[in-house]
Amino acid sequence: NVKFTAEMEDSLDKVEYGKVEWHDLLQGYYQEMTRLIRDLDMQKAKQENMETTDIKCDKCGSPMIIKWGKRGQFLACSSFPKCKNIKNFEKDDQGNIRILETEKLAEKCPKCGGELVIKNGRFGKFIACSNFPKCKFTKPVSLDIKCPACEIGDIVEKRSKKGKTFYSCSRYPDCKFLSNTLPEKIECPHCGHVFYRSSDKQDELNLCPHCRGEID
């Protein structure tokens, strides 16, 4: 809201120059926000933010609609909750919608035999069964890097609640390895042992875990 932003900047300037007491400014802002929230019709607001498209649901044939979620806009079936089909999409310069296809894996779901796909969640990418919600099988996406700590599990990429990327062992909580950097592949010049190490784990940088020989 350009008008609101301009007025707020003007008010903050007055606070800076000592023309307005900041307690009074915040009190007035709080009272106005309280009134707006009280008078807001959430159901009506949700309806106004929905946009019907000419795209048909590939599961039930109903029209798909554009909705807003925590991570932005997405396509959802208008027959929700009977049909829970959703799709990610992007728009070109002309406003045309292009559905972003889900990446499918060659392996099958160990629980129901359905196709496994890669999805994006609040904590990063993960593998899930395409038959969701009937089948709720999930597992982390492996980076084909062995865990430097236990050398059994694989390193997986995750995202914190604040959106920061980090790396952990797929055997968590049995293995509690965490790293802010992606472990790199190292071959020991003394014994030939191949392992991975992280640049933010200073105590692991210069010693081979197999022969304890020093590594540059």
Image (cartoon, rainbow, N blue to C red):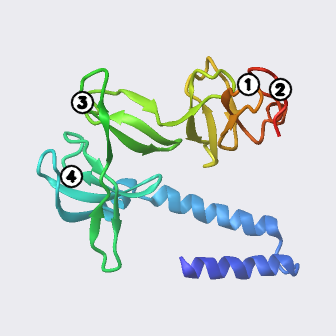
Residue position marked by numbered label 2 in the rendering: 213
Which of discs 2 and 4 lies nearer the camera? The answer is 2
Residue drawn at x 64%, y 21% as measured from the top left = 175
Looking at the picture, which amino acid does disc 2 mark? Gly
- Name the residue nearer the viewer: 191 or 93: 191
Looking at the picture, which amino acid does disc 4 mark? Ser
Which of discs 3 and 2 lies nearer the camera? The answer is 2
- Name the residue nearer the viewer: 9 or 116: 116
Residue position marked by numbered label 3 in the rendering: 114
Which of discs 1 and 2 lies nearer the camera? The answer is 1
Asked if the residue under mark 2 is in contact with the one under mark 1, i.e. CB atoms within 8 Å, the reply is yes
Q: Earlier in the sequence, mark 3 or mark 2?
A: 3
Residue drawn at x 37%, y 60% as measured from the top left = 45
Indicate which disc residue 78 carries. Answer: 4
Q: CA distance from mark 1 to mark 3?
A: 44 Å
Asked if the residue under mark 4 is in contact with the one under mark 2, i.e. CB atoms within 8 Å, the reply is no
Placement of 47 over or under 188, stated as above or below: below
Q: Earlier in the sequence, mark 4 or mark 1?
A: 4
Q: CA distance from mark 2 to mark 4?
A: 63 Å
